[in-house]
Amino acid sequence: MSTVQQFNGSTSPDVVISVEGLWKQYRYGTISHATLRKDIQSWWARVRGRDDPNLPIGMEQSAKSKASDSMPSAPGTMLSGDDRFWALQDVSFEVKQGEVIGIIGKNGAGKSTLLKILSRVTTPTKGEIKIKGRVASLLEVGTGFHPELTGGENIFLNGAILGMTKEEIKRKFDEIVAFAEVAKFVDTPVKRYSSGMYVRLAFAVAAHLEPEILVVDEVLAVGDAQFQKKCLGKMADVAKAGRTVLFVSHNMGAVSALCATGILLQEGVIAYSGSATQVVTKYLEYGIEKTGVKTWNSGVGDDSLRLRTVRLLNSNNNVTNTFDIKDNITIEMEFEVLRTVEGARVGFRLLTSDGTIVLTSEDTDSCSSLSIKEPGLYQTKAIIPGNLLNEGGYSLTFGCHLPMVRTIYFEENCLGLTIENTGGVGGFVDDKRRGIIRPRLSWEYELIEEK
């Protein structure tokens, strides 16, 4: 049985979300059979345990074979002889009232699928979910907005979709508009809004209409830094008011700061759960390459640009992942351009062991002429100077993208590196200093009065 229902009662009164044995299956390359008649035929065949009449020739399975395939043998396993895969596998957890829980994992881990099921956007294949209270979801920018309606009209429309009464929306209307900073455009159709205005209004509606449970997927990445800070503050206020927040983000610093607990998903399975700090640490350690180099034999990307190799080099031009605090760190990337592409950028993001972003750099920082890339194999390097980073562990995320258009490829926590203090900035091993960076600044002395 697969259900999403309201609590009728619970042995633990403070539990507002209970997930038990949740499985979700998808089919590769298709959402449905394009017609209602075929969808009903396929559904009826599954109910009767018979072959799906709409499968391509050669893809049919007997009822016996389907029964044996009902559960995969290992995480991420594709069902034998079929074109299905499990996005979630036997996921179980509970969330208590007022808890702020971070759900993290790499792309394709099942995070968004889980939130869509909790928000009743899609249904589980198997398992049971019990929810106590009203859920407001912000899964995609402007979900539920109508482009032809004004910002004000969409506040009422989206509020109604979230289950709010007209009086509730009226009471919060001015506060929503002020938070979203769209007062001048509240009577303008949202199809004319920028992506930033769109996400501000969408978040403002979801966060201000007093849901018992607020579900937020990675939409805050669309807003600017000031707006992201504003949203994080609002979610903290929601939690302090005794309401529950489920927060999915690739910003580990935000997860660590906002959430008390967390869940790490890997290939649809809960790999770890615990405090937010512990979960973030496990996430950053998972799958990270510690040899100082990572190569993709066929390259990763799309038909325009493919990343081939990334590596870390010390001052002697040797590949390594361990550096003295005084050493320069050379970050080298090799990529192939398959066709002329304009505006493509390659770069990296450096993060601390708790997920705080230290810096982001792209090849166009000093090579603007490379904004137009002709076909060929390229190598680019960036140098992080010595006496800048503090001792400790770090990770590097690599990516290539077309700004404001699409991400070509994005590899989180691809390489790990360690900074060791063998002599310190001042020449002493025990010269400990607080902070992510500890640059060797230039100091000047002048005796202005002799005693």
Image: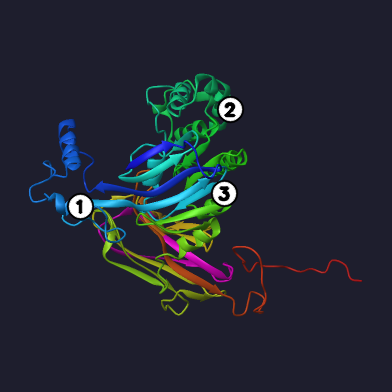
Q: Position of residue 122 (x, y in %)?
A: 33, 39
Residue 437: quadrant of the picture:
bottom right
Task: Give the magenta-colored segment's residue range.
Answer: 369-397
Residue 44: quadrant of the picture:
top left
In the picture, the quarter occupied by the N terminus is top left
- Position of 97 relative to 257 (above/below): above
Can residue 82 be seen by looking at this rendering? no
Can residue 112 be seen by looking at this rendering? yes
- SS category of the residue bearing label 3: helix
In the picture, the quarter occupied by the C terminus is bottom right
- Residue under numbered circle 3: 258
How far apart are labels 2 and 1 at the CA level? 54 Å
Amino acid beneath label 2: Glu
Q: Position of residue 58 (x, y in %)?
A: 8, 51
Q: Say whether disc 2 or disc 1 marks the residue closer to the N-terminus.
A: 1
Amino acid beneath label 3: Leu
- Residue under numbered circle 1: 67
